[in-house]
Amino acid sequence: MTFNLFRSCREVTALVLAREDRHLALRERAVIRLHFLVCKACPVFEEQVLTMRQALDGWRHYREAEPGED
Amino acid sequence: MPPPSTSSVDAEQQAQWLSRIEAMQPTLMRLAQLQLRNRAWAEDAVSEAVLAAIEALPRFAGRAQLQTWVVGILKHKVLDQLRRRQREVVLDESAGDDDETAAMFRDDGEFAHAPQAWTAPAEALRQKQFFEVLEACMELLPGRLGRVFLMREWLELSTEEICQELALSSTNVWQTLARARLRLRECLQLRWFGEQKP
């Protein structure tokens, strides 16, 4: 059975989210790259997920650092 | 160079650390409650962490940031609480069966409304007010969704470790985390990026 590389935004955003918590298989990464060539909405979603990643890392530091250290 | 001996920490220095530990208790309580979603469990975890920190204070010797060190102790005590209450944590189904993606996509799987780029995200990450909004959004994550998400993002456990701690399948944990991230995104959109901030 062949693996379908052409997926919908719903499936691609699920992969973008999954990437935060597990390693994606090569073909899953290929699905994202291929989809991003033809979609303008999903890269915006990815940017938001990356912002949340930085925000969560920043929040952890903000909460664990000495008051006034920042 | 050998580590400083306990006798090198004078009484005045220890008294100063004790007073700082006392002052950080509201922050410790907030973090514990954010993870445990239960005030009584959080109070237990904070009490245990503060006692452990006070006992270990002579060995602390100022080799790290005091608050970072105490929060590290708290994380262990919070994880102990989660282990003790594992059954209640897993049975908490208050996350409901909502499908967070239902309103996001059409039946054909394409976006119902294309997401709008967030303005000035780098600027937001420099503002204390933004982190308070982010924390409020995490607080809004219901029951198990919130606990699993904070285990990942605050306790910094791997998904495999979360599976072990809560006896859940990896698929279940991945789905829970994805749902939490979608809710967090929506909350930030509504409470921060959808509004004009100074």
Image (spheres, rainbow, N blue to C red):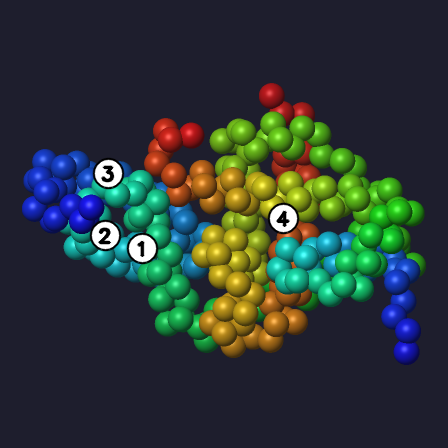
Mark 1 touches mark 2? (CB < 8 Å): yes
In primary-sequence order, the first of circles 4 and 2 is 2
| Tag 2 secondary structure | helix
Question: Of the numbered discs in the image, which one, if any, rests on residue B53?
Answer: 2
| Tag 3 secondary structure | helix
Label 1: how many residues lie within 10 Å, few (<14), some (14-19) or many (20+)?
some
Q: Quadrant of the C terminus of chain B?
A: top right
Disc 1 target residue: B73
Q: Nearer the viewer, mark 4 or mark 1?
A: 1
Mark 2 touches mark 3? (CB < 8 Å): no
Circles 2 and 3 on the same chain: yes
| Tag 4 secondary structure | helix
- Residue B170 vs residue B33, the one in the foreground: B170
In primary-sequence order, the first of circles 3 and 1 is 3
Disc 4 target residue: B184
Mark 4 touches mark 2? (CB < 8 Å): no
Asked if residue B40 is positioned above or below residue A48 in the image, the reply reads below
> CA separation, marks 2 and 3?
12 Å
Name the subunit of mark 3: B
> CA separation, marks 4 and 3?
32 Å
Mark 4 touches mark 1? (CB < 8 Å): no
Mark 4 touches mark 3? (CB < 8 Å): no
In primary-sequence order, the first of circles 4 and 3 is 3
Which residue type carries mark 2?
Ala
> CA separation, marks 1 and 2?
7 Å
Observer able to see residue B43: no
